[in-house]
Amino acid sequence: MDQGQTLRQHLDGFATDPDRRLIADAVAAFADAAIEITELTCGGALAGITGEGQTLNGDGDIQKDLDLQADRIIRRALAGVSVAALASEEANEIEIRDPASAISIAFDPLDGSSNINTNMSVGTIFSIVRTPLHARAAFTQPGTTQLAAGFVVYGPQTSLVLTLGDGVDIFTLDRKTRAFRQIRSQVKIPPNTAEFAINASNRRHWDPPILAYIDDCIAGADGVLQTNFNMRWIGSLVAEAYRILTRGGIFLYPADARDGYREGRLRLLYEAHPMAFIMEQAGGGATTGNLRILDLAANTLHQRVPLIMGSIESVQRLERMHMSPDIKFERNAPLFATRGLFRN
Ligand code: AHG
Ligand code: MN
Ligand code: MN
């Protein structure tokens, strides 16, 4: 296969004005950081990575050693880029750097931390937004103000998924040349799917529309969806998103009844917003079940949000199931057999 253009060439082609140059430099900085983080994920214990940690972050998660190292690597890589405000999953406060800069960045330095010491894929997620009049307000804007978003998967390949607002492209790290090379352009998510991803161990905590939808998936070809579904759950949002971009699918981390999970587990600013931007740019969708993720604005830095994303037909079905209060979600009621409203 002919080797695609490098990420640098792609970014240089995009950088046609000073603001775009700034965005390009920020993306290049994340790519440089990703190359350094890859050394740590590939080395694992040999690189001194244990996946253990003692301190808690602002969201109450234990900060694993790689969470903190990735955070430091990214901040160092961004030192040469003019950024107004910086928000990280691993920091309790926003860092104000250059208030006059046109861009601000929210990032999850290491996504899927519970997978670090199990040799499973982990990642980095970033969201680049336009800085408003006051840099401190950078992260109180709706997701529609994003200028770019991306994520890196540290898996068998280190791959970077990127949207600059005009479709989604994927780059894979060429470890010989230490350059990211384009492997896919203008990625489109299949509108339909037969694959769902949810942490099924939380089933007893789910709200009725989620219960009904997942039970419909499990009912297979004899159920209302008339399809035999497959299930995946990797525990790394980036890996689930990469799979959906590759072959379609529906990912759900819904609100559930557990303490602290009434708004789900994923964070709006540095997980749901960037993922939603990428999903929509690739023809998919992203919703809370009731609201479009990109229309939401955060009130707090680590605000959680229910996240359902992926193939657009499945996202829309789930939205309808959330918005039809008159449909009773009794289990196996005759109504479900003829729930023509959702047949599509
Ligand atoms: P992070 O490691 O940044 O906290 O993200 C982990 C998230 C997400 O990557 C994944 O989909 C989800 O947590 C897994 O949650 P459960 O462990 O509750 O399944
Ligand atoms: Mn995460
Ligand atoms: Mn994280």
Image: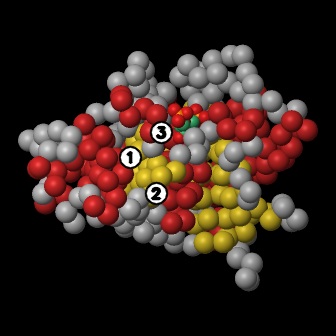
Q: Which mark is residue 199?
A: 3
Which percent across, then down, holds residue 103?
Answer: 55, 45
The image's colouring method is secondary structure
In terms of sequence position, does the residue under pointer 3 or pointer 1 come before the other? Answer: 3
Q: Which quadrant of the rendered structure holds the N terminus?
A: bottom right
Q: Quadrant of residue 65?
A: top right
Q: Which residue is mark 1?
A: 308
Which percent across, then down, holds residue 311?
Answer: 39, 61
Label 3 within 8 A of ligand 1 by Cβ: yes
Q: Is residue 160 left or right of residue 278?
A: right
Q: Residues within 10 Å of mark 1 (few under 14, many from 20)?
A: many
Residue at figure coordinates x 71%, y 74% from the top left = 5
- Callout 1 amino acid: Ile
In terms of sequence position, does the residue under pointer 2 or pointer 1 come before the other? Answer: 2
Could you give the CA–CA distance between mark 3 and mark 1, rounded to whole angstroms? Answer: 12 Å
Image: 204 above or below 314:
above
Q: Quadrant of residue 15?
A: bottom right
Could you give the CA–CA distance between mark 3 and mark 2, rounded to whole angstroms? Answer: 13 Å
For this rendering, which residue is in front, 114 or 303? 114
Which percent across, then down, holds residue 141?
Answer: 39, 38
Q: Which residue is mark 2?
A: 230
For this rendering, which residue is in front, 163 or 202? 202
Residue 80 in view in this figure: no
Label 1 within 8 A of ligand 1 by Cβ: no
Q: Which SS class for mark 3?
A: loop
- Callout 3 amino acid: Asn
Q: Which quadrant of the rendered structure holds the C terminus?
A: bottom left
Q: Which mark is residue 146?
A: none
Q: Which SS class for mark 2?
A: strand
For this rendering, which residue is in front, 183 or 325? 325
